[in-house]
Image: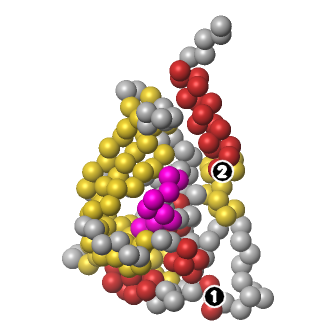
């Protein structure tokens, strides 16, 4: 009988999951670009929240490592969720020196505040946020004003519905780096450019609500 080390089995399972679910490149995980209209339409739940707890656990069924993030739900923008807290599972994490990382996947950080577009609250996905970075936006507070930024720390200045763009000149879907790209229609500039142009949290949420049917 040939003995295969447990660590090798874990590595093979992780590789199989990545191969089945993603197209990986040297630059990072590649995903299809989405418009903000599509992200808003396809998300099961959109909420403003804050990270309360991050806990890394090993799944006893498949021996993989996951990070469970518990959010305080401050405002539901879309969806039927009525609770005050929500736990989402992200693939990867660190346990006893063993690290599992998915290229392009950003797990919300400790005490992070943001606006989250959740693909599903019941299905087990590599990343529960729709379009990965395309459904993950941060809330920053400066001089008493709460504003919204991308994961790249660029402030968002406008939300432009792509549906309003004539199809003849609409940008074709493309592959993006899942860790850094925001949805098409999200207009952003470096934070140092002009904070006065950045949308407030309420302005951003109003713009998203305007996209709902």
Residue 162 belongs to the span the image colors magenta: no
What secondary structure characterizes most of the magenta part? loop
- Do residues under tags 1 and 2 come within 8 Å of each other at their CB atoms? no
The residue depicted at 25 percent of the width and 56 percent of the height is 52
Q: Quadrant of residue 191?
A: bottom left
Q: Nearer the viewer, residue 122 or 75?
A: 122
Counting other residues with Cα less than 10 Å from the Cα at mark 2, is it few (<14), some (14-19), or many (20 or more)? some
Where is residue 187 drawn, in percent x and y?
Answer: 53, 79
Indicate the secondary structure of the residue bearing disc 2.
Answer: loop
Where is residue 78 drawn, in percent x and y?
Answer: 41, 78
Q: Which mark is residue 22?
A: 2
Q: Nearer the viewer, residue 120 or 206?
A: 120
Q: Which mark is residue 163?
A: 1
Q: Nearer the viewer, residue 194 or 58?
A: 58
Q: Nearer the viewer, residue 82 or 12?
A: 82
The residue depicted at 78 percent of the width and 88 percent of the height is 168
Give the number of marks: 2
As drawn, is 201 to the left or to the right of 131? left
Q: CA distance from mark 1 to mark 2?
A: 27 Å
Q: Is residue 99 shown to the viewer in this render?
A: no
């Amino acid at each position: 009988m040939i003995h295969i080390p447990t660590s090798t089995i874990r590595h093979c399972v992780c590789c199989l999951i990545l191969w089945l679910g993603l197209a990986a490149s040297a630059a990072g995980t590649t995903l299809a670009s989405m418009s903000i209209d599509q992200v808003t339409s396809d998300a099961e739940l959109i909420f403003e929240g804050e990270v309360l707890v991050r806990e890394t656990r090993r799944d006893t069924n498949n021996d993989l490592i996951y990070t469970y993030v518990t959010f305080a739900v401050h405002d539901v923008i879309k969806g039927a969720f009525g609770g005050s807290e929500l736990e989402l599972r992200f693939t990867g994490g660190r346990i006893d020196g063993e690290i599992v990382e998915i290229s392009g996947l950003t797990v919300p950080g400790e005490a992070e505040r943001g606006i989250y577009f959740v693909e599903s609250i019941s299905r087990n996905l590599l990343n529960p946020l729709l379009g990965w970075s395309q459904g993950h936006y941060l809330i920053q507070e400066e001089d008493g004003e709460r504003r919204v930024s991308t994961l790249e720390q660029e402030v968002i200045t406008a939300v432009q519905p792509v549906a309003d763009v004539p199809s003849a000149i609409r940008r074709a879907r493309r592959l993006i780096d899942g860790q850094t790209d925001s949805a098409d229609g999200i207009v952003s500039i470096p934070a140092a450019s002009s904070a006065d142009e950045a949308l407030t949290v309420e302005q951003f949420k109003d713009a998203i609500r305007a996209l709902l049917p």
